[in-house]
Image (cartoon, rainbow, N blue to C red):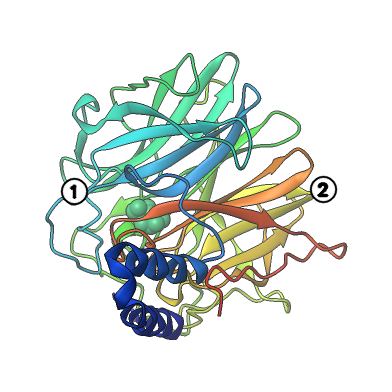
């Protein structure tokens, strides 16, 4: 799963050369120079360095920015294509008054030991607010090692959250993202292939012996993310789980072999000028891509990539509007240089007049 990127190699080489040139100035000077070069290759800096955080789902609640991230830890599990090394056990919620404001870590908001049906691996969460209640949606493997999506509730955005006794009926796989439309209806987008197990689900049934990846049906339509309308109490699905169809500009479904464009994981939805933007990670090709539709159900027409690969294997984001500007929250591995120990970041996201999104380059060349 590892990839080596040229800019990283270049930055490390330059850092080594400059630091050794500065040797007569002592250790502190060396560290300062190495640090400034290391930092300068990144477009943005980590929002918090006391804990490792990833998969940031940002929302504006009570006039503040709240971030619902994964809390990465060193669980000691061997790295593999199923993502077993992402062995997270709780969630910390972060908040700030403004995009560049001081970050407050509100501590543990939900722990795996307080989710009655959970087995292992608390992955990327999201949150929503309706009728005086905050909802935290989270994927975790159940005791049979199958990813399902749970929900927990609280009266304040930072929790603590109390988990419902069972997963959401009809939910499966990972990466829930809940979008509430201007008419008040909410929808959950979810799913992820490979470690997210989506390729093991067929007609609502899980095949424990199914493939570990999406390879094998290269010329067939790629696996789709899923969408379901939420019930008015936000605790269950109101209606069937549907495919999020991703089409090319000729109206044909993207194919499995199209690794640069097909859906992998990390769905998000935002609405801009009346259009629905479905954004997602292409996984093993490490892009963030976007597709536009006319309804929350799609179909969505692929438009392009809007973020180049970050340092690290996974790429995962959320998009919010704050004070008239749009921002993308994302992660990379700047602090640890380890796939499973990530740190969250933010940068501005620009929509052009024609509806396209400017390409973001998270690593400065
Ligand atoms: O954090 C674990 C997994 O890594 C997430 O669920 C994926 O989206 C990827 O970021």
Tell whether circle 2 marks a residue whose Cβ is less than 8 angstroms from ligand 1.
Answer: no
Q: Nearer the viewer, residue 3 or 283?
A: 3
The quadrant where residue 353 appears: bottom right
Give above or below for 191 relative to 128.
below
Give above or below for 224 relative to 204.
below
Disc nearest the viewer among 2 and 1:
2
Q: Where is residue 208 in the image (x, y as percent from the top left)?
A: 19, 58
The CA distance from mark 2 to mark 1 is: 40 Å
Q: Where is residue 10 in the image (x, y as percent from the top left)?
A: 42, 85
User: Going by the picture, which residue comes out furthest to the front?
Assistant: 24
Q: Nearer the viewer, residue 148 or 161?
A: 161
**Mark positioned earlier in the residue sequence (2 or 1):** 1
Asked if residue 338 can be seen in this view, the reply is: no
Give the labeled residue for mark 1: 145
Q: Dot 1, how many residues are within 10 Å of its Cα: few (below 14), some (14-19), or many (20+)?
A: few
Q: Position of residue 228 (x, y in %)?
A: 54, 42
As helix, strand or loop, the secondary structure at mark 1 comes to: loop
Q: Residue at x 77, y 59 (%)?
A: 351
Give the labeled residue for mark 2: 274
Q: Residue at x 33, y 33 (%)?
A: 167
């Amino acid at each position: 799963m590892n990839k080596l990127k040229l800019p990283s190699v270049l930055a490390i080489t330059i850092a080594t050369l400059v630091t050794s040139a500065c040797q007569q100035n002592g250790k502190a000077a060396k560290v300062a120079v190495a640090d400034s070069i290391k930092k300068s290759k990144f477009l943005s800096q980590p929002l918090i360095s006391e804990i490792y955080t990833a998969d940031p789902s940002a929302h504006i609640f009570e006039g503040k920015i709240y971030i619902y991230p994964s809390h990465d830890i060193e669980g000691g599990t061997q790295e593999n294509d199923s993502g077993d090394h992402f062995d997270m056990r709780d969630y910390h919620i972060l908040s700030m008054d403004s995009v560049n404001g001081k970050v407050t870590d509100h501590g543990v908001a939900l722990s795996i030991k307080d989710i009655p049906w959970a087995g292992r691996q608390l992955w990327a969460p999201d949150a929503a607010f309706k009728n005086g209640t905050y909802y935290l949606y989270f994927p975790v493997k159940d005791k049979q090692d199958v990813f399902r999506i749970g929900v927990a509730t609280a009266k304040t955005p930072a929790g603590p959250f109390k988990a419902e006794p069972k997963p959401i009926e009809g939910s499966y796989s990972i990466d829930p993202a809940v979008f509430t439309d201007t008419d008040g209806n909410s929808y959950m987008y979810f799913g992820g292939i490979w470690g997210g197990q989506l390729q093991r689900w067929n007609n609502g049934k899980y095949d424990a012996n199914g493939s570990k990846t999406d390879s094998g049906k290269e010329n067939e339509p790629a696996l789709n993310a899923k969408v379901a309308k939420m019930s008015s109490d936000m605790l269950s699905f109101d209606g069937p789980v549907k495919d999020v169809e991703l089409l090319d500009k000729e109206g044909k479904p993207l194919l499995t072999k199209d690794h640069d464009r097909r859906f992998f994981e990390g769905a998000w939805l935002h609405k801009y000028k009346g259009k629905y933007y479905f954004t997602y990670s292409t996984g093993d090709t490490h892009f963030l891509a976007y597709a536009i539709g006319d309804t929350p159900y799609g179909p969505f027409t692929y438009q392009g990539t809007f973020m180049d690969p970050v340092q690290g294997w996974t790429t995962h984001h959320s998009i919010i509007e704050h004070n008239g500007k749009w921002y993308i929250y994302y992660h990379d591995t700047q602090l640890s240089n380890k796939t499973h120990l990530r740190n969250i970041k933010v940068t501005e996201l620009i929509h052009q007049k024609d509806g396209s999104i400017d390409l973001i380059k998270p690593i400065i060349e």
